[in-house]
Image: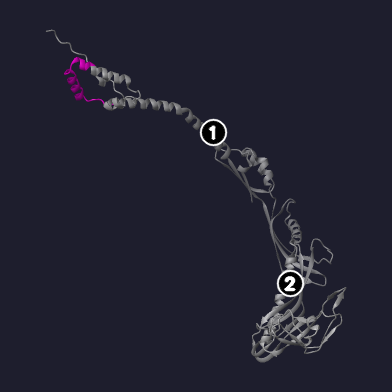
Amino acid sequence: MAPQKKKKLIPVTDIIAPGVSIPTQKNKEDDIDTLQSVSSEQASFLNDIKFEALRDFGKSTTPHAEESEADPALHTLNNSWRGGRNSSIRKKRKSPMRLGIIFVVCVVLLYVILGVLPRVTIAIVTKKIQTQLTTSVTVVGSSTPLIDATTQVPGEIITERKTNIFKFLATGKETTKQKAQGSVALFNAYGTAPQVLVAQTRLESPDGKVFHLVNRVVIPGAKKTGTVLEPSSISADVIADQPGAAYNIDPVDRFTIPGFKGSDKYEKFYASSVEAMSGGSDGETAVASADDIKKAQQTSLDKMKESIAETIKLKTPNDFKPISGSEQFQMITQKVDARVDKDNNFSVALEAQLSLFIFKEQDVKTILQKKAQEKEQMPQDYIEKDGSLSYGQVVVDWKAGTVVLPTTYQATFWKPVDVVKLKTQILGKKETDLKTTVLSLQGIDKLTVSFWPFWVSHVPRSDSRTTITVE
């Protein structure tokens, strides 16, 4: 018998795709034994299948889905190859996009570093001169001429007059029977001839309350213009027909005169009141005591003075100021009406006037500024930075039309810095040139320059990124 040729076997496991596990030595030996036990045709068939799989690995498995599922190792091999190849393609496609993004980021960072971050803050402290001056300034009324412009300023005298009625609560008690009293206006709309009404002539209100004329009254004749008759009128005092608070009635638009009833005069002669009737009582009632009246007189004066002063304040021009203590208050008339109305109030009628000096405070400050500059021997270009005026007790001479105003002036002077002009001079300059420019200014006591970030060494060209503060 001729010796049997050994078949040459090509192990499939020598070609391994990524992701496929390598069989152990024991598995290799089992595979060799298995191959030796089959016929040469079967071995050749198996080898052809495995090499075909190796030639096709990496191709799309969509048409051969069933074959891939039948051989898990082949499925893993194909997927691993495709994944690596597709990943490489994606990386190649994304490279230009990544470069573009990196370029944009670099441009933005460069813009921020060079165009946004650089900032300069300059803090300037100027030299200041503080002064205090105490003197007197004379305010002269408009009717008096100025004599010395270094000690006198023009002023004005304002005078305001007012009339008012003030009501006060009566706190006294008294048992009395009093008839209400008041006043009315009697009208003649009948003819051009005057009409006499005797004392005790009755006047009746719409609700039946009867009042009598206290005195005889002659109502003037009406005025006639063409065919138009203009009623005439006259004021008269009246008193209630009966005592009691019921007659303390409010103002009435039309009283009739019962004596004319039944004639043409009944509609043409009438009366009206503009104030309530008062003083009517029957039994214990409130009365104005002596103490009530005394307090009411003083309170009415105080209220009137305050009211007139407020009116003068409203009428004073904005650039003028009233001089406190220069007021002259005069009472023209004061009349107390002790009758008590239905609300237990009595009244005080008062007429008074108030005069006072006003002046322009800036005129006083101008004089004192000049005196302070001379006192401290300041440079001509130094001006007031802040200042205040306070006044002492004034001395008023109404006859001469002047008021002496003791004044204390406290102020701080400096030479101001034109920040806008300075900015235009320093924009874009280096640090050394910047300091030279700023230090050349007059009246500078201290200078601080801050550059940010640390690498900045010149002033930005942008006005918004350069800050200058002056103290």
Q: Horizontally, is 200 left or right of 113 in the view?
A: right
* Quarter holding residue 397: bottom right
Which of the colour schemes (rainbow, by chain, secondary structure, one colour) is used? one colour
Viewer-nearest residue: 272 or 381: 272
Residue 59 in the image: above or below residue 181:
above
* Quarter holding residue 246: bottom right
Residue 283: horizontal and vertical position, in percent? 64, 91
State the CA–CA distance, disc 1 to disc 2. Answer: 74 Å
Q: Which mark is residue 308?
A: 2
In what element is the residue under mark 2?
helix
Q: Magenta part of the protein: which range?
A: 20-44
Amino acid type at circle 2 is Ile
Residue 183: horizontal and vertical position, in percent? 75, 83
Residue positioned 52% across, 33% down in the render: 104
* Quarter holding residue 195: bottom right
Magenta run includes residue 37: yes
Question: Can you identify the residue that label 1 sits on?
Answer: 107
Residue 23 in the image: above or below residue 410:
above
Q: Residues within 10 Å of mark 2 (few under 14, many from 20)?
A: many
Residue 161 in the image: above or below residue 433:
below
The first of marks 1 and 2 along the sequence is 1
